[in-house]
Amino acid sequence: MSDNDGWTVVDYTKKKTPKPIINKPYQPIKTNPIINENKIIKKPIRSNLHKIENETETFTVKRFGSIGKTVTTFRTSAGLTQEQLAKKLYLPIATIKNVENGSAVYDGVLLNKLKQELKFK
């Protein structure tokens, strides 16, 4: 028997043809449309700045305040230092100090941790 026996071998694999190299002229990098060739093009600013300038709403940040004194009282009655309480709650010492002096921003999750650890309501 011969190798072909009347059969024709057909190759169906797709041959990759290399992309032709086209010599393109040099194109400089696109510059900012506001600054073009050392000339500053002034565009009108469309914004709502007048709304911001006329804003009268005031924002307040809720702080721990008087709760800090309660935390200090219960912490000392439990015989814990600020450092020990911070380690038990996995918090930085600065957080406990800020809560006790009332400068910490109110955080309900932190307050619940303190309530559970120091057992106060």
Image (cartoon, grey):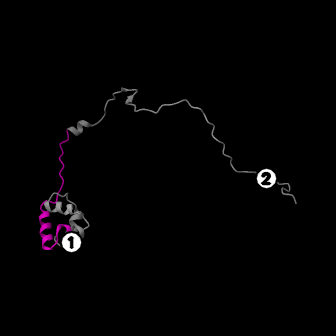
Which of the labelled discs sits on residue 99, or is there none? none
Residue 33 lies left or right of residue 94; in this view the side is right
Q: Residue at x 19, y 63 (%)?
A: 96
- Count how many numbered circles sit on residues in the image: 2
Tell me where residue 92 appears, x and y as whole percent: 23, 63
Residue 93 quadrant: bottom left
Residue position for label 2: 9
Tell me where residue 55 appears, x and y as whole percent: 20, 41
Foreground of the two, 92 or 42: 92
26 within the magenta span = no
First in sequence: mark 2 vs mark 1: 2
Q: Which residues are magenta?
A: 54-83
Residue position for label 1: 117
Q: Name the image quarter holding the C terminus.
A: bottom left
Above or below 48: residue 16 = below
Foreground of the two, 108 or 2: 2
Residue 104 lies left or right of residue 26; in this view the side is left
